[in-house]
Amino acid sequence: MKHILIVGALGQLGSEIALALRRKYGDNSVVLTDIRDDINRQLIESGPFYKVDCRDAKALADIVQNHHIDTVYHLAALLSATAERSVQAAWDINMNGLMTTLEIARTFRCAVFTPSSIGSFGPSTPKRFTPQDTIQRPTTMYGVTKVAGELLCDYYYHKYDVDTRGVRFPGIISSMTPPGGGTTDYAVEIYYAAVAKHCYECPLAGDTYLDMMYMPDAVDAAIRVMEADPAKLRHRNAFNVASMSFCPEDIAAYIRTHIPDFTITYRIDPVRQAIANSWPDCLEDYAARVEWGWNPKYDLASMTADMLAHVGARNQTGGSPCSQTN
Ligand code: AKB
C-alpha cells in the first residue's frame, strides 16, 4: 500500500498528479501540501491537505511521520520567467525546498520524484535532438536550480541510497489549473484566447520552437518513472521526455483547423524570448523509452482538439471577437 505526499500540490502539475494518484491509491493515501489554500477547494476537500511552506522541515517531517509516507512528489518551484525576476527567491524556494524534501526522505526512507526541465539546458547544449547526457550550462536562475537539483538528487541516491527519480519536463499544456510564471505558458493561454476572442497576442516570436507535452502524458511520466523496475534504471533522475515540438505559428495553424478566423499577433516579451532562445528546440528521449517504457499518446493535432473541447466546455458564454476588442 502506497502512502504519498505531494509538496506543491495545487500548482498546474500537482493538481493533476494529485487527482491521478488519489484515483489510483485512494483519497486518504495521498496527502497534499501547498503554500496556498485558496484555490481548488474540491481537491483540498477530497482528502488530507495541509497548508505548509515547502521549506518548513518540521511541519513536513510531522506529516511524513503521521501519515507513514513512503513516496514524496516534490513539485514546489518558481518557474523560469518568475525566477528571472526574483532571483534570490528562486534559489531559496527551488533549492532549499528540494533540500528539505531530500533530508526528510533520507530520515524516513522515502522515494522522491522531482521534476527537472528543458530549462536545465543552455545555449551551448545541442539544440536539436538534445541527448540525455550532454552539456548543461543554463543561463537562467531557473536552469541553474534545475541542474543543481538534478545533481543533488543523484548525490542523495549515491551517498544515502535515497530512491530519487525524475524527468526533464518540457512546457506542459492543460485545461484544469493554469501554469504561472513559465516561458512556455503561452501554449496554454493561446487556447483560452482562441475560444474566447478568436485571437491571441503572443509573447514569443512565431518561429520559436520548444518541446511541449499534454498533461495526461506528463502525469503518466511522473507516475510511470516512480513505478519503474529499479533494476532497469541506468539513469535515475532527469530523464529527457519528449512528445511534441512546435512554434507559435504551428499551434496557430492547428487552432485554425477548428476556428478558421483565429488570428495570432506578436508582442515579444524580451525576458521570455531570451529564455526560450537559450533552450533546445527538441529533445531526444531514448533512455526514458527503453529504461521505463515512456510512450506519449498525444501530438499537436490530438492535443489541440482535446484542449479546445475542454476550454470551450468551460467557456460556454464565449467572448467578443478580436475585431471588437482590439
Ligand atoms: C517554464 O516555462 O518555466 C516551465 C518549464 C519548461 O520548465 N514550463
Image: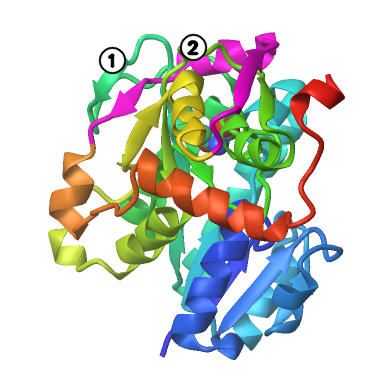
Which image quadrant: the C terminus? top right
Q: Residues within 10 Å of mark 2 (few under 14, many from 20)?
A: some
On whether residue 282 falls in the magenta region, the answer is yes
Q: Where does residue 145 sit, x and y in percent of width and height? A: 55, 33
Using the image, determine if residue 196 lies above or below residue 53.
above
Residue at horizontal 72 percent and vertical 30 percent from the top:
82
Q: Which mark is residue 126?
A: 1
Residue ID at (43%, 24%): 250
Q: Which mark is residue 312?
A: none
Does residue 319 sit above or below 56 in this rendering? above
Residue 124 placement (x, y as % from top left): 36, 9
Left or right: 125, with 186 as reference point: left
Say if 31 sits above or below 318 in the image.
Answer: below
Q: Earlier in the sequence, mark 1 or mark 2?
A: 1
Identify which residue, 290 or 319, lies in the foreground.
319
Amino acid under disc 1 = Pro
Total tally of numbered discs in the picture: 2
Please, what secondary structure does the residue beneath circle 2 have?
A: helix
**How far apart are the alpha carbons under marks 1 and 2?**
12 Å
Q: Name the quadrant where ligand 1 sits.
A: top right
**In the rendered image, which residue does mark 2 sit on?**
277
Q: Amino acid at mark 2?
A: Asn
Q: x, y (%) of residue 44?
A: 74, 75
Q: Quadrant of residue 129?
A: top left
Q: Quarter-wise, where is residue 85 in the image?
A: top right
As for residue 26 lying within the magenta part, the answer is no
Tell me what residue is drawn at x 32 percent, y 41 percent. 243
Query: Does residue 100 appear anywhere in the picture?
Result: no
Q: Is residue 49 visible?
A: yes
**Where 305 sits versus 40, above or below?**
above
Q: Nearer the viewer, residue 121 or 299?
A: 299
Q: Would residue 89 appear left or right of 253 to someone viewing this image?
A: right
